Image (cartoon, rainbow, N blue to C red):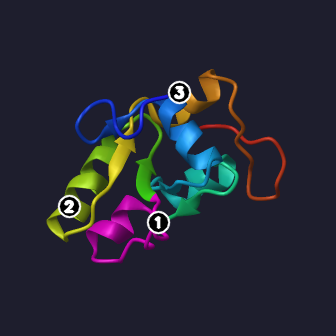
Amino acid sequence: MPVFPTAPGRLDVVEAHHLFREATAVLLDVRESEEWQAGHIPGARHLPLSRLAAGAKAPGAPAGSRLVLICRSGKRSQEAVRLLRERGTYAVDVTGGVKEWVSRGLPVQDAAGAAGTVI
């Protein structure tokens, strides 16, 4: 398994899942609240891109872990990575986003903890 990342600033879903499962990455979902509530990765943190763009701070990653950003398909997470890097925070994003996560059979849950969907 590659260490981190395979492409500058980007991880594929398999790499992101591995880092997250091994607790060497904090997974930050930058989708909006309605999307998050419909289906998010269990254990991920949530900070919508709109709040990040308005100046909200991203949660810090514990020592030895990475900050990995994810959105629906990969576009917003790239923008979030750019914003964070401008602020001096190292982060990478996940290519294909939550849509690719689900297509690989990886879990998402809704706000009630039941099986989620990607909207």
Residue carrying label 2:
85
Looking at this view, is 115 or 22 the one in front? 22
Discs 1/2, front: 2
Residue picked out by circle 3: 100
Residue 116 appears in the picture as rendered: yes
Q: Position of residue 13 (x, y in %)?
A: 50, 31
> Which one is earlier in the sequence, the residue at label 3 or at label 1?
1
Left or right? Give the position of 2 relative to 52.
right
Q: Which residues are magenta?
A: 47-65
Is 11 in the magenta?
no
For the residue marked with disc 3, what is the amino acid? Glu
Badge 2: how crowded within 10 Å, few (<14), some, or many (20+)?
few
Residue 110: x and y, percent?
74, 51
Amino acid of disc 1: Leu
- In the displayed structure, 116 sits above or below 13; it is below
- Name the amino acid, label 2: Arg
What is the C-alpha distance between the residues marked 2 and 3?
A: 24 Å
x and y, in percent, of residue 118 in the image: 61, 37
Identified at 26% across, 42% down, the residue is 9
The first of marks 2 and 3 along the sequence is 2
Nearer to the camera, 47 or 10: 10
Dot 1: what SS? Answer: loop
Q: Which residue is mark 1?
A: 47
Locate residue 102 relative to residue 3 in the image: left or right: right
Q: Is residue 51 left or right of residue 62?
A: left
Q: CA distance from mark 3 to mark 1?
A: 20 Å
Identify the residue at horizontal 32%, vertical 37% (top origin). Answer: 10
Residue drawn at x 36%, y 60% is 49
